[in-house]
Every structure is written in C-alpha cells, then in structure tokens.
Image (cartoon, rainbow, N blue to C red):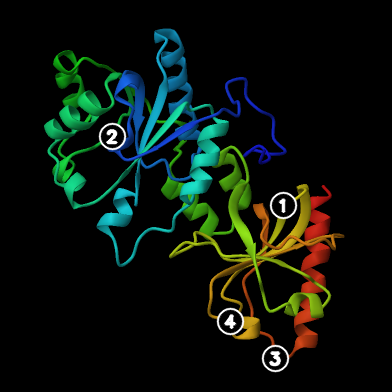
Amino acid sequence: MNPPYNAGHPVNDWERETTMELVRGLHNVDRAARGCVLTIGAFDGIHRGHQEMIRVLRTIAAAERLPSVLLSFEPTPREFFAKATPPARLTRFREKYEALRVYGVERFVCLRFDSALRSMSPDEFIGNVLADALGARHIVVGHDFKFGRGMAGNVATLRAAGPEAGFAVTEVPPFEIDGERVSSSLIRAALDAGDMARATRLLGRPYRMTGKVVEGAKLGRKLGFPTANLRPQRRATPLAGVFAIRVSGGGLHNAPGVASLGTRPAVNGKELLLEAHVFDFDGDLYRQTLHVDFIARLRDELWFPDMDRLVEQMNQDAARAREILSR
C-alpha cells in the first residue's frame, strides 16, 4: 500500500484510506449502482477547500445511506479551453486518485472533457449525466459552480431542476484561510513564488509530485549525489528550482533529501525532470514509484561555468536542506 497522501501530518477524523471505485466514462457506470450523493469539479490539487467539499459530501452520504461520488474531468475544462497555454496542473490524474482515496471518496467517476461534453446544454447535462447515468439524489457544489454550454448553468439551475430530476442541492460556502478564499490559482501563485509554507497551509499538506523512477545519465552519482529521476509528465509545472524534500515509496518513508526540478541548465538539459537525492541512501530505486513532498525552496536553477562550481553549490544546497529538515 502507498504511504498516506498527507504523510507526516495528523489525520483528521474524517480522513481514511479507502477502497475507491474508479469509473472511466459513463458507459462504465453500473446501472444497478445508480443513486448517490455527488459533487462535481476539476478538483486540481485537492486543497483544503476541496477537502471541505468532500467532508460535506461524506456527511450527507452517510446520513442518506448512499455512496459518495465525485465527478471530475480529463483534461480539465481549463486545459481544454486553453490548449496552447494551459494552467500549470497541480495534480496529475494518479495523484488526484490517491488523494481522493485518502479523503474517503467511495466512487471517482472521470469523464473525458471533449467537444461533445462541452456542447451539452445545462439541461442536457442534468438529464443525461446527473439524473440518468448517475442517478444523483443529492448534489454538493460550491457557490461559484458553473456547468453546461457557455457555462450557462449554475447553482440556481440545479436547484430549479432538482424536484423533477429527483435530487436535492447543497451549496458549500467558500473556504477561507486568513481571510482568503482557498483556490487552485492561489496555490499556483504560492508555488510560483516559492512560498512553500503558504502552499502547505492552503493544501493542508506539503505539495507533492508522484512518479516512477526512470534511467538517467548517472551524472549525479559521478558527482557524489546519486539521484532518482522522475518525469513530471506535465506540460507545465507550477514550480521550479532546488528544494528541500521528503521522499516516500520504494521502501522509504518521509526520507529527507534535496531535489532539482526543471530543465537542468547546469548540464545544458532541455527535458523537464525532477532529480531527487535522498540523504544517506545508496539503494536502487529504479522503476519504483516515489512520492516527493516539497518542503522548502532553496534557490532558482542556475548555470555553472564548470563541474567544480556545480559540486560546491550542490554541497551548499544539501547542507541547507539538512538544516531545514532537521527543525
């Protein structure tokens, strides 16, 4: 079993790792299993606002003795509408799946967001997806929820359709921290600024990337800093630079380390890569799935005139990361 998504942090009494059913596409929905309490959205990041939505979802589902179901989309609607310059994704599909399982969602329904789905009117989406395919009996959404062609549907649209379609609607107010509404955009801004403490506060856990270790050029090992190399598998990342990290997976649990995320200008690299060096570890992590938690940002990526200067900086980064992680 993978380590808890919020490894190293207290678990709220409503958080629990569950066996979550994953359904890809409406054609795979078990018609005999219709009837649920449902929430809908992109849920990029599964931040504290999303967690509050899931808490309300689960509370209502338990009271009504119905399964809790989350409906989301791949690609996200924002990625679909901004194909050339999509926003940096906080969580890949697998990372989202793991977080939802920890936060206790019973069924994760993922629909492909394409031209057909985009062209559905609000009434068609309610009738075809929410009522007919999913059999929703109660829908939980945020105050700013929009859906359907031209984003013409909203909470009022759902409430008006509810009696005939057979569902009730609960509107969840904005979730705020220090007077600010928690959002994926706010977290992207914090990560871009290197404010990892703020990102952690908004997420309720350190920002994490998950991936399988791939073969590298082994330059780090030659320089005394062997690295586990992971491809972020994103067109754009919300952060870049050198970081103090903790690593789980492959037999490790919250192991301290230092990582570089970017295109490696020091070695004239072009491919986006996450290179994680785990302190005091000399095992083989190749092909293992690792979870890298970003604890503190140390600096930007830099170009160095020679390998000696690079190694000197790597030693400085490692010493600083050790000091931060020992606090």
Give the residue type that dot 2 points to: Phe
Mark carried by residue 247: 1
Secondary structure state at the residue bearing disc 1: strand
Disc 2 target residue:
145
For the N terminus, give its image quadrant: top right
Residue at mark 4 to residue at mark 1: CA–CA distance: 24 Å
On the rendered structure, is 182 left or right of 150? right
- Compare marks 2 and 1 and give the one earlier in the sequence: 2
Residue at mark 2 to residue at mark 4: CA–CA distance: 42 Å
Residue 169, image quadrant: top left
The residue under the point 73% across, 68% down is 227
Residue at mark 3 to residue at mark 1: CA–CA distance: 30 Å
Q: Is residue 282 visible?
A: yes
Mark carried by residue 305: 3
Of residues 49 and 61, the one drawn nearer to the viewer in this rendering: 61
The residue under the point 87% across, 60% down is 280
Q: Is residue 313 above or below residue 40?
A: below
Q: Is residue 168 above or below residue 277?
A: above
